[in-house]
Image (spheres, rainbow, N blue to C red):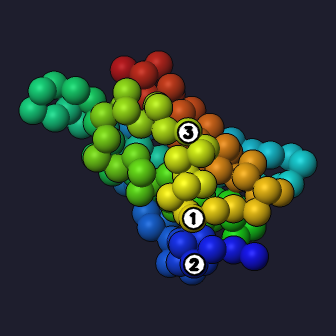
Amino acid sequence: MYSKEVMDHFQSPRHMGPVDNSDAVGSVGNPVCGDMMKIYLKVSRNEAGEEMIEKIGFETLGCVAAIATSSMITELAEGKTLDVAMKIEFKDVEKALGSLPPIKVHCADLSVRALRKAIEEYRKAA
């Protein structure tokens, strides 16, 4: 049912937990399925002066797919500029995980929405 990559990110999630002294948090939830996600960002500037994701973490309450997609979005976004991270789409998350069952694709979308919300929160505060 789940790909090897999905199970790997579920069993050994990357960047799980809040980031100390985070600059922004994006919280989203899906009341239909009960998944809740928070993405934490620590932002710095690279040599070109662009804002980039220095550290990223997540807290997710949800199913296998919700945890795996949260883990994968952190892998895809870490070290990227905010502009590049904003362009990550649910298809990118799904592809990086190998595949998701059609009924679980909404988890990839939820993880992208959490990341974008965190970036938006950072930009509002900056």
Cα separation, mark 2 vs mark 3, equals 21 Å
Q: Nearer the viewer, mark 1 or mark 3?
A: 1
The kind of residue on which mark 1 rests is: Gly
Cα separation, mark 1 vs mark 2, equals 8 Å
- At horizontal 16% and vertical 35% (from top left) the residue drawn is 46
Estimate how packed mark 2 is, as few (under 14), some (14 to 19) or many (20 or more) residues with alpha carbons within 10 Å.
few
Say whether disc 1 or disc 3 marks the residue closer to the N-terminus. Answer: 3
| Residue 4's disc number | 2
- At horizontal 57% and vertical 78% (from top left) the residue drawn is 4
Q: Which residue is mark 1?
A: 98
Residue 13 position within the rendered picture, expressed as x and y whole percent measured from the top left: 51, 71
Closer to the camera in the image, 98 or 80: 98
Q: Is residue 110 left or right of residue 57?
A: right
Closer to the camera in the image, 125 or 100: 100
Answer yes or no: is residue 70 visible.
no
Q: Which residue is mark 3?
A: 89
Residue 5 position within the rendered picture, expressed as x and y whole percent measured from the top left: 54, 72
